[in-house]
Structure formats: C-alpha cells, structure tokens
Amino acid sequence: MRKTITFILALTAFTAVLARPKVTITISSNRLQTITGFGAASCYGAMEPYANDTQPVKLLYGDESAIGLNIMRMEISPNFEGDVKVAEWNNWDTPYDWNGSLPSAKIVKERGGIVFGTPWSPPGAYKTNGTAQGGNSDDQGNQRGRLRDDCYDKFFPWLNTFLEWMHNHGVDVDAVSVQNEPDWWVSYSGCLYTPEEQLKLVKNYAHMLDRETYKGVRLISAEPLGFDPNYSNMLLNDPTARNQVDIIAGHIYGHPPLANLKNAAQLAKQYGKEVWMTEHSVSDNIQDRLPNWDEQLEFAREVNECIQAGCTGYIYWYMRAHWAFVSTGETKYGDQNKTKNKLLPRAYVMSHFAKHLTHSTLLESTCSFDLITNAAIETSAFIKGDSLIVTAINNTTSDRDFIIKLPCNVKSGEMLLSWGNNADELCQKYPIEEIVEPTNKPTVELPAKSLATYIFCINNDGTAISELTPTYHKGATTWYDLQGRQLAKPHGLCIERTADGTARKVLVE
C-alpha cells in the first residue's frame, strides 16, 4: 500500500519544513448544467450469453450498487416483432432482437434508471442497399446503405413499434436516437446520413414519434462518430427540427471532449437541450492486460472533460470487457479478471462520478492548473442538495496541498480516494478532520497519481431550499426532502419542484 492509513488520515497536517506544492480551485456560485447521469451499453458481444446475463447491471446500476450508474443504452436492432418480416439474417447481422436487452432493461428501470435505444440501422427494406448491413463489404461493393427517399415516412412509425414492444414487455423506454454513427461507413449494421439528410428526417417526420402514447419519451439526435457539430447545429438552427429533438448526442472517437463536443454543446445550451456523450471506450485497444493506473486516470480525465465541455450525460461503451467495468473471466487479462462478473478498477473510478455527481449541478470554477494548457491536474465542483462536491485528478508524481476556495461556508467533509488498481487502493473513504468550524477555504491533501472526491456539508444555517436547488432543464421535475436534499425519486412527504420553479409539498405513497 503506497501510503499508510495514519498518513492518509493526517490529510492537512503540513509543516513549513515539509511544505508541498500547491494547487488551488476557486469556485463561484454560478450554476452551469445539471448532470442527468452516467451509464454504459447493454449490447451483444462481451455481454454474452446475452439475454440471460443480468449480473453486470445488478453490479453497476442503482443506489444499491457500489457504482451508481443510471443510464443504459441498448440497440434497436433492425427487425420487427410479429408477422412482418423485413430482411433475412446474414452472417454479419447482430444475432439478437429486442429480447436481448429486455432482462437488463427491466432491472435498470426497477432501480430508477433511464433506458434509451439507438438504431444501428433501420430495417433493410427501408434502405438503398436492401439490407441492414452498412454496405462496406465485399458483397456490397460501393453500395452505401442509406435511408431510401420513399421510406422517410416509415422511420418513426418503426421506432413506435419498438416502443410498443418494450412497453408490452414491461419497459417504458425513456428516449430513442435517430442513428448510431451516421458518418461512419461500416461492414456491420449501419446507415449513413449527411447532416442535411438527418435534418430532412427530423424536421419533416419526427412529429410521427408517438409521444402521446409513450408519454415522456424523448428524441435523441443522431450520434456522430466524432461528435461532429454540423449534425446537431443543423437541427438546432431549424426551428421546426429544434422543437422535435430533446437531447444532442455523439461519440468522441478521434476528437477529445474539449473540441467538437464543446462546440456542439454551446448551441445546445442556448436552446436548453441536454448533451449526452453516448459511446467511447478509453484503452479498448489493450489486447493482453487490464488497463494500468495511468490509463484509469486517463478515463477519469475524459469523464471530467466531457462534463466541463457541457455534457449532462456520459455513457461508456461496453459494461463488461477487460478494459471496462465488469470482468469477463478470461485469465489472459490478469488475476483481477479471472472470475467472471466482478467489478474491475475502472468501475470504481466511474463510481466517483456516477455515485456522487448524478443529479448534481456543475458550478463554474477555475483551477491554478489550466485545463487547456496544463491538464496534469484537473478539478470540477458541484452542488447537490446540501453538499458541495469537488473532484480532483492529480496526474503528477507530487502530493499537493489542495486549497479549495468556496462560495459558502462548509461545516464538515469526507474524502473518497483512489490511487491505484489494487483493491485496497480503490475508493477508500476518510473524514476531513481539519474542519473544526465553518470555513469557506479548507485546505486538504491531494495525493500524487490519484482521483479524489471531496464531499463537504454546506453550513446553511436554515438556508431556504430555493437557495440550494440546482438549475432546471426544460421539462424537468425534481424532488427534495424537507431538509432540502435532492431525492433520486419521490417518497413520503417531500417537496416537488417543477421546471418553472414552482415548489409544493406532496405526499408520495
């Protein structure tokens, strides 16, 4: 173990002789976006045996889990349920239908989570190449699979059949996307759209999505490979299309979060739209080992930078893979992976965000290490109920004095610390004992090569709930207990706050 418990508990026992280098975060009361949550995909592949394996979601989702994920992505595979058969399955096809994600989706919903579906391709009969395959294969030549002009009016009714089937089987889907990676020509299931083609589809036909029957279902934009802002900006700049889309989404392959994603988020914020990063995997190119600790910190930095870029939701790729959250049981990746369906170190890294930042609101802050020019240390700050939360990633080899300048007084706190891949180095919890009276400038330790989450209790002295609650997205309703702490879902006597800021006491049985 790199540090002794005695040293860790000391936290801020500094002396002039042993002075450490300093890092400072200055936090304002200016509220930015509210975080909807964090998640992963339940898709064929590493989840196999697919339909019967619900252990990953049981380990990862809900308040009762150690990790706290609350968003699940599933594929809307290109087939129909019932008498209508659209295309024959070929060797390249995804060999499952909507049943595949159903058991996992049920558990996620039972635990208060969000389930959304993404089409990799609409049915082959709707496409120019007559198959769900993307077209980038020997038997297709240069036949790129696109949605046929005469089938644009069939697309949203097809999504309605998915919503109906899932509803009839016990899951009310929360959102559906237009397309997975519309800008990536693939040999597996895929469909190409230009930004102009997506605009045509959403502007002229998205009104056919049956929001009346499936109340609350939201529409997610197509999810381009590198979060190309041309896709989302074209939708948002058109008033008709803008009124149809609820969430702007994309992936960050080849484009770091503070580039295209940040660009797309600027216009989305202007129009009150959520921004979700819906697929990426850090270090998935590792073939023979688990990620090392530097690679885990790289993952933590990516999540933090997505939030700083404007994300309200972050969804990782596979739940189960040796480079993901749950072990595959393949011993070639190391001892920690030898038992199937065990939490891996990356899951505990994710818990810093998912367990504590879901439903929090990002606060504007500045760090003495600049995120653009010197990201060796990254920080963020959030408010959640009566807690003020600070996350910090120290990728240097030096322990630091971490000076936290707050917009309010805090009366107590605790630190969650991860500093390595071993079990005794993951998510250890320590009290911040140096806060003996209310302060707005605590100084704590930020250990070298660590991910730390500091949770402070606001000294509000009876502050009204309106002063503690986060910024609201259009259409959002949130609930609080009578002490002003935000609830994941309402129960008992609580305070209901609607999108227009109206608050009332309600009794939920």
Image: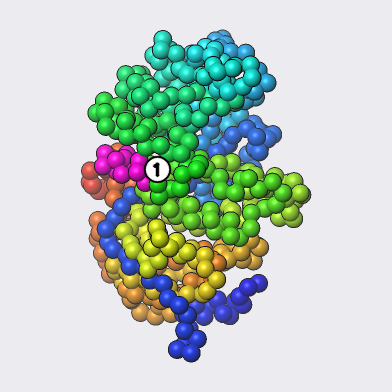
Q: Is 408 included in the stretch rendered in magenta?
A: no
Q: Residue at x 51, y 47 (%)?
A: 69
Q: Residue at x 35, y 41 (%)?
A: 264
Q: Is 262 included in the stretch rendered in magenta?
A: yes
Q: Is residue 41 left or right of residue 330?
A: left
Q: Position of residue 209 (x, y in %)?
A: 38, 22
- The image shows residue 438, relative to residue 54, as above or below, that is below
Q: Amino acid at mark 1?
A: Asn
Q: Which residue is mark 1?
A: 260
Q: Position of residue 437 (x, y in %)?
A: 35, 79
Q: Quadrant of the N terminus?
A: bottom right
Q: Residue at x 43, y 44 (%)?
A: 313
Q: Position of residue 307 (x, y in %)?
A: 40, 51
**Secondary-structure class at tag 1:** helix
Q: Residue at x 25, y 56 (%)?
A: 466
Q: Is residue 408 left or right of residue 396?
A: left
In this view, which residue lies farthest toward the front? Answer: 142
- The image shows residue 24, relative to residue 16, as above or below, that is above
The residue range painted magenta reads 261-273
Residue 97 visible (yes or no): no
Q: Quadrant of the C terminus?
A: top left
Front one among 369 and 434? 369
Front one among 429 and 318? 318
